[in-house]
Image (cartoon, helix red, strand yellow):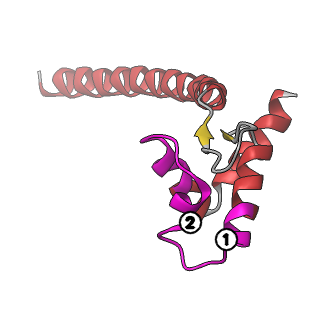
Amino acid sequence: MVADTLSRVFAALADPTRRDMVARLAGGDATVNQLAEPYEMSLQAVYKHLRVLEDAGLVSRPSAPQPRPVRLETEVFDLMDEWIERYRRQAEERYRRLDAVLAQMNEATTDEQDGSTA
């Protein structure tokens, strides 16, 4: 389930227009017309982008009379952050081990050079 959700989220965010919409919604809720303003596309195309974002769980549009605000759903970002952080920790641990190996190699080289000049 989590993998499917992450796949939908990353696929939705792969499009620059949708990333821009998400960035704009981070500043606050907006109507579809407000979201559509900067884009040179039909309102129907904007609705299609919003549908992808909704299906991924990134935004919601509460059922209310028109105009309905589009709202950013932050829970999905927590899920993404957990996934990214897990791999960041693994990479950092790998780099710490590499740093330790390089430090040992550097120390051995320094010891050899000190021993050959004495």
Residue 33 in the image: above or below residue 77: below
Q: Which of disc 2 and disc 1 is earlier in sequence?
A: 2
Badge 1 marks a residue whose secondary structure is helix
**How far across and how far down the image is residue 110, in percent?**
23, 25
Would residue 91 be found to the left or right of residue 51 on screen?
left
For the residue pair 65 and 42, the one nearer the viewer reads as: 65
Q: Which residue: 52% across, 42% down?
A: 29
Reading the image, the residue beneath label 2 is: 36
**How far across and how far down the image is residue 114, in percent?**
17, 22
* CB within 8 Å, label 1 to label 2: yes
Q: Residue furthest left?
A: 118
Q: Quadrant of residue 52?
A: bottom right
Quarter holding the N terminus? top right
Q: Which residues are magenta?
A: 21-47
Would residue 40 be found to the left or right of residue 111 on screen?
right
Would residue 43 be found to the left or right of residue 28 on screen?
right
The amino acid at mark 1 is: Leu
**How far across and how far down the image is residue 107, in percent?**
29, 21
Q: Quadrant of residue 112?
A: top left
Reading the image, the residue beneath label 1 is: 43
C-alpha distance separating marks 1 and 2? 7 Å
Badge 2 marks a residue whose secondary structure is helix
Q: Is residue 31 magenta?
A: yes
